[in-house]
Amino acid sequence: MSYNYRSYNFSWGGGLTKGVKSLLLVNGIVYLAQLFLRGKLLYIFGLTPTLVKEGYVWQLFTYMFLHGGLFHILFNMFALYIFGGDIERAWGTKEFIKYYFITGVGAGIASFLLSFNSSVITIGASGAIFGLLVAFALMFPERIIYLYFLFPIKAKYLALLFGGIELLSSFRYTGDGIGHFAHLGGMVVGYLYLKADWRIKSFFRYLGEIGHNFKVKASEKKRKKTERLMLRVDQILDKINQVGYQNLTKDEKKLLEEASHRLSDEKK
């Protein structure tokens, strides 16, 4: 449900969308599996940098579906519901899901690279959620969010606040069991992806624009070169009218021959 108050939009997700619903369902099923299997899933599917180096690369993807407790998954899924619905409605389900996984995997890669020799397991969808926060803040910067259901704050300031907290926390390891590198990685990857627009279609469109600009510049350069040549040819022809062909210099005769060949090639 959305409504206006003092010219700001308040949002509580606006109803479940297809992509958000699917992610909520998958995360819920995996959490139930964790409850039955207890810690058995963590070793294989949680993100452990030392194991990733040994070939457990799937952990960069699977870690985001595991959670450390009821509060952990409830917080992440509530944030997914709050931020994800409006984003998915704006982008479409396919682009939304793609962005979710890009930021989630990107957060996992950041955590892996910045804690390369760690054997601590990182789990949770928080990296992707922080990526959604960045997208939401860029799309709806003036939208009011109630932090902890009490403190109203604009989305753009909320993103800056959490980004600053994660940045400071990543520099001073607190041993609090929170994946600060993953959170920060999700935000950075999300921001770069949205600002650079690295989507496949845009990438090829960008290459096409580069190719087009190159052709235009090359054509313009060729045109100017031809104009200079023909100007020089006109000067030589005037000289021929005055003193005759036999009195031309060797370079002038060579230039006339070059111009003749070029005009012949252009006609072909």
Image: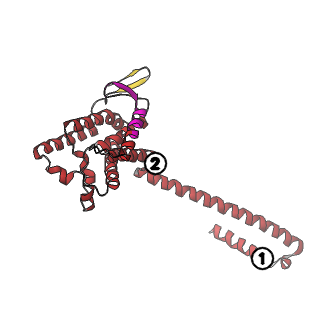
Expressed as whole percent of the image width and height from the top left, the position of residue 210 reads 53, 56
- Report the disc number at residue 126: none
Q: Residues within 10 Å of mark 1 (few under 14, many from 20)?
A: few
In front of the other: label 1 or label 2?
2
Q: Is residue 161 magenta?
A: yes
Label 1: which residue? 251
Quick check: 179 above or below 207? above
Residue type at numbered disc 1: Asp
Q: Residues within 10 Å of mark 2 (few under 14, many from 20)?
A: few
Which residue corresponds to the image point at 40% horizontal and 25% vertical from the top-left?
9
Report the magenta residues as a range: 148-164
Quick check: 233 above or below 131? below
Please name whichever residue, 103 or 182, is drawn nearer the observer in this view of the structure.
Answer: 182
Label 2: which residue? 196
Q: Which image quarter holds the N terminus? A: top left
Expressed as whole percent of the image width and height from the top left, the position of residue 84 reads 32, 36
As drawn, the residue found furthest toward the top would be 6
